[in-house]
Image: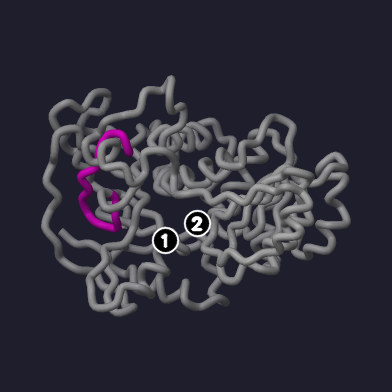
C-alpha cells in the first residue's frame, strides 16, 4: 500500500507493507485523512535522513476486526486518531480504543478531522472551565477555530483573536460573535465579554516565540486565571506578572488521557470511566457527537481537498504563509 512520508524536509508518497491486524484492533480502508499543519510541518522539518510517516487523523470503513473487538463490525464507518496507528495511508490497523463510529448523516470529510477535534476538546478540558466562565482563543487556524467553536457551543463566554482578517471572518461566520484582528480592541472589550473580572482562561494556539504573547495573555486573565499552551510556543514570560496574579501556565498534550500509553493504545486496555472520565478515545467520540448534532461545523474550514498521491502539493502550500490554506484533506479510493 502507499503512504505519505517525509525525508530531509521533502514529502514523498512511498510504498509500505500493509499493517497487520492485532487483537483489539480494526483494519480500516481509509476514505479521508486530515493534515495537522503544526505537528506535521514540524515533523517534516525535523525528518533529517530518516523516513517519517505522517498523519494522525482519519476516517474510513472497517474491513476486518481483530479478536476481542466489540461494537464494531465490517462496513462501519469510523473516525480514528493517533500515530503510529493512524497516518496518511491507504489502510490502517487501529486499536478500537482510538476509534468512534460515525453516523450515516455525518459528512466523512468532517469526521476525518476528529483527531484535531479531540486535541481541541482536551485543550478546553485542560483549562478546567465551568459553565458561564470565559475563554480567549489566540490563533484561529483550524485548531484554534475548532476550540473556539466548541467553547461557544458549550456556552462559555468566548472570544477569538487572529491578526489575519480571513481567519477572523471565518470564525465569525461560524457563529462566534466576539472575534478580533486587533488585540488592543479585544482588550477594550474584554471587561464586557468576561463580566468585568478578566478571562478565566486564555488558550494560545500560535507558534514561535511566546514571550510577548504569554505576557499579554497574563494581562488578560483574571486573578488566578489560566493560560493553556496549545501551539508550539517557546515558554518565556514575566515571572512578576505571573506572580502578581498567581496565574497557572499549563500545556495541553494531544487528545487526552491514554495518549502515549502503550497499555491503553496498542494493548487496547481502556481506563475505567469512574477513574478517567475523558480519554482520548472518548474525546474523539464526543467530537463526532458535536458534528452529528450540528453544534459545530468543519466543512467551511476545509480549503483544500486533493487525492493523497498529490500530498506534496498541499504541504508546499503550508510552507507559503500567503497560500490561504486552513484545513486540508487527502482523499483515497472513490473519494479521490
CB within 8 Å, label 2 to label 1: yes
Residue 97 visible, this angle: yes
Q: Residue at 29% across / 44% down in the picture?
A: 60
The CA span between labels 2 and 1 is 7 Å
89 inside magenta stretch: yes
Question: Foreground: 67 or 316?
Answer: 67
Q: Crowding at label 1, few (<14), some or many (≥20) Cα neighbours within 10 Å?
A: many
Q: Quadrant of the N terminus?
A: bottom left
Q: Residue at 32% across / 63% down in the picture?
A: 307
Q: Residue 85: percent from the left, percent from the top?
A: 25, 49
Q: What colour scheme governs how the chains and residues are painted in the rendered image of this protein?
A: one colour
Question: Foreground: 331 or 218?
Answer: 218
Residue 109 visible, this angle: no
Q: Which residues are magenta?
A: 86-98
Q: Residue 316: percent from the left, percent from the top?
A: 42, 76
277 left or right of 261 in image: right
Which residue has dot 2 on it?
302
Q: Residue 97: percent from the left, percent from the top?
A: 31, 34
In the rendered image, the vertical position of residue 265 relative to residue 173, given as above or below? above
Which residue has dot 1 on it?
305
- The local secondary structure at tag 2 comes to strand
Q: Residue at 81% across / 42% down in the picture?
A: 194
Q: Residue at 87% across / 47% down in the picture?
A: 191
- The local secondary structure at tag 1 comes to strand
Q: Crowding at label 2, few (<14), some or many (≥20) Cα neighbours within 10 Å?
A: some
Amino acid at each position: 500500500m502507499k503512504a505519505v512520508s517525509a525525508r530531509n524536509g521533502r514529502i514523498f508518497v512511498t510504498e509500505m507493507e500493509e499493517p497487520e491486524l492485532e487483537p483489539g484492533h480494526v483494519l480500516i480502508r481509509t476514505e479521508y485523512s486530515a493534515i495537522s499543519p503544526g505537528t506535521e510541518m514540524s515533523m517534516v522539518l525535523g525528518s533529517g535522513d530518516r523516513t517519517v510517516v505522517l498523519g494522525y487523523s482519519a476516517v474510513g470503513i472497517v474491513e476486518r476486526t481483530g479478536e476481542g473487538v466489540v461494537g464494531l463490525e465490517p462496513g462501519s464507518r469510523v473516525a480514528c486518531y493517533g500515530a503510529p496507528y493512524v497516518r496518511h495511508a491507504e489502510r490502517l490497523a487501529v486499536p478500537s480504543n482510538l476509534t468512534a463510529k460515525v453516523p450515516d448523516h455525518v459528512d466523512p470529510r468532517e469526521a476525518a478531522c476528529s483527531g484535531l477535534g479531540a486535541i481541541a476538546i482536551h485543550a478546553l478540558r485542560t483549562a478546567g472551565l465551568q459553565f458561564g466562565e470565559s475563554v480567549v482563543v489566540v490563533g484561529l487556524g483550524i485548531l484554534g477555530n475548532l476550540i473556539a467553536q466548541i467553547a461557544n457551543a458549550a456556552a462559555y463566554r468566548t472570544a477569538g483573536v487572529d491578526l489575519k482578517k480571513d481567519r477572523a471572518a471565518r470564525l465569525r461566520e461560524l457563529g462566534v460573535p466576539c472575534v478580533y484582528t486587533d488585540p488592543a480592541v479585544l482588550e477594550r472589550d474584554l471587561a464586557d465579554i468576561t463580566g468585568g473580572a478578566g478571562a478565566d482562561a486564555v488558550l494560545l494556539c500560535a507558534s514561535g516565540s511566546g514571550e510577548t504573547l504569554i505576557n499579554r495573555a497574563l494581562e488578560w486573565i483574571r486573578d488566578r486565571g489560566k493560560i493553556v499552551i496549545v501551539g508550539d510556543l517557546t515558554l518565556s514570560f514575566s515571572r512578576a506578572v505571573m506572580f502578581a496574579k498567581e496565574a497557572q501556565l499549563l500545556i495541553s498534550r494531544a487528545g487526552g488521557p491514554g495518549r502515549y500509553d502503550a497499555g491503553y493504545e496498542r494493548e487496547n486496555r481502556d481506563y475505567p470511566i469512574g477513574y478517567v472520565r475523558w480519554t482520548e478515545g472518548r474525546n474523539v467520540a464526543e467530537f463526532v457527537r458535536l458534528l452529528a448534532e450540528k453544534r459545530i461545523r468543519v466543512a467551511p474550514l476545509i480549503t483544500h481537498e486533493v487525492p493523497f498521491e498529490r500530498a506534496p502539493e498541499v504541504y508546499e502550500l503550508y510552507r507559503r504563509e500567503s497560500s490561504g490554506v486552513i484545513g486540508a484533506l487527502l482523499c483515497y479510493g472513490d473519494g479521490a
